[in-house]
Image (cartoon, rainbow, N blue to C red):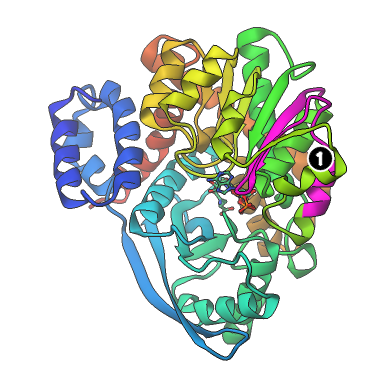
Amino acid sequence: MFKSAYLINVYADLSKRYQDQPEFLQAVEEFLTSLDLLVDKDPRIQKNAIVERMVEPERMIKFRVSWVDDSGNVQVNRAMRVQFNSAIGPYKGGIRFHKSVNESIMKFLAFEQTFKNSLTCLPMGGAKGGSDFDPAGKSDNEIMRFCQSYILEMYRHIGPRMDVPAGDLGVGAKEIGYMYGMYKRIENEFSGTFTSKGIESGGSLGRAEATGYGLCYFVEEMLKTYKKDTFKGKRVIVSGAGKVGSMAAEKVIELGGKVVAMSDISGVIHDENGIDIKLIKKLSQTNTEIMNQYQTYHPEAIYSPNTKDIWKVPCDIALPCATQNEIYLESAEELVKNGCWLVAEGANMPTTIEATKYFREHNVLFAPGKASNAGGVAVSGLEMTQNATFQNWSFEEVDEKLHQIMKRIFNRCHEASLKHTGRPDDLITGANIAGFMKVYEAMLQQGV
Ligand code: NDP
Ligand code: 2IT
């Protein structure tokens, strides 16, 4: 928690107003704890009510999405877009389809996105959107009808210089394709609004790989800087086998690490021979919930239906890549007990505040998601540039740019950590302060 009276007051006010939004309050608390080192030294922050403004979204759009299922029944879902902060560029952030989507989760994601996008150094503001629509078990036609109906409301709030959505949990190139197709019919122009599009629709090569690969590039920098080491021979566990987790696992293996466990909503696979990532990628082309099928192909692997069991598998490095709050204190204790010494977040806020504190107390190197998973939105930024200039860059060109961006993000976090805490490895404080500075300066420049 923080000691500054200013921050205590802002947070007390916020938690009273949004007491039913635990994820949002958690993200704000974690962020403000880092600002504690800054606010009392710089009176302009309080005088201009910077923190009060930063913790309120500029705009939120809430709407109903009605659609017709394959049986001819009318279904109703709730959807929203949180346009949190546009100080440094057009609103930018993914769309999530998951039954858990609510205002608290959308606000925490959009809040974090603001500082993540700032860390990339590209001109992108922060936003997030989504719906409690659950794509699991829906036919392609149902998903298409839902996406089209969603866009019939959303189209008026987005645009290439206004708000550029992308994928997130439950939303991949297929859903983006349906949304972009409908948007284009309404707007009658090829504007590139939406990133993580299919390649043929104007998507960028390397976007599908970007978050997972970027995560590994970030970890490489940590290993090099703090341990003079590499991924070679390290035991790695990866929760989530979706867009982020599967690409992270693929890169770990390419860099010489051994992925010994992965998970999805159907459970955990522990394979001492090393996870068969080609199989995971193949199965996930047609299905979610694939872990319970893995043993059919590799009978020697161990399966558990309990997703939390992944944190019991001994490892050097843990990469949580599934969803928010997947590592609680007990899982953190389990990880440390079994020898884990580096945790890097591929998902957004997968670690609770208590678990993060425990890692810090036990000298576990820790990378916060807003820095380590920024590769996805960074390549989204590169996709926007390609669309705006009618260019297509090669995979190698995009991957090289991603690599440089992740190195730069690491260096910014590392330098801010040293400057503000005297420690080189407090990447949480480093990421929060470095992300904050650009947004703060832009807000000052633009007046009230
Ligand atoms: P996907 O929907 O592609 O994959 C999510 C994966 O996590 C699936 O394997 C899913 O299992 C699994 N999962 C979901 N909930 C749980 C749970 N409670 N326990 C175990 N496994 C679970 O999403 P993404 O890979 O795109 O996103 C994952 C995370 O990364 C999210 O936090 C997202 O916000 C974040 N992120 C995504 C970026 C992107 O560009 N896509 C960029 C930066 C961050 P199943 O398939 O069985 O449902
Ligand atoms: O959380 C994230 O950074 C994303 N889901 C990607 C956002 C984007 O606009 O590419």
Q: Residue 367: give x, y in percent of width and height.
A: 53, 26
Q: Compare residues 372 and 77 and report the one nearer the observer.
A: 77
**Res. 427 visible in picture:** no
Q: Compare residues 171 and 211 and report the one nearer the observer.
A: 171
184 in relation to 318, above or below: below
Q: Residue 15: give x, y in percent of width and height.
A: 19, 44
**Residue linked to disc 1:** 277
Q: Residue at x 69, y 8 (%)?
A: 228
230 in relation to 8, above or below: above
Q: Residue 445: give x, y in percent of width and height.
A: 32, 46
Q: Compare residues 360 and 289 and report the one nearer the observer.
A: 289
Which region shows up in magenta? 256-283
10 in relation to 21, above or below: above
> In what element is the residue under mark 1?
helix
Task: Say whether residue 277 is magenta.
Answer: yes
Q: Residue furthest bottom?
A: 72
**Is ligand 1 within 8 Å of the beta carbon of the residue shown at mark 1?**
no
Name the amino acid, label 1: Ile
Q: Residue at x 44, y 57 (%)?
A: 100
Where the N terminus falls, by quadrant?
top left
Q: Is residue 81 left or right of residue 323?
A: left
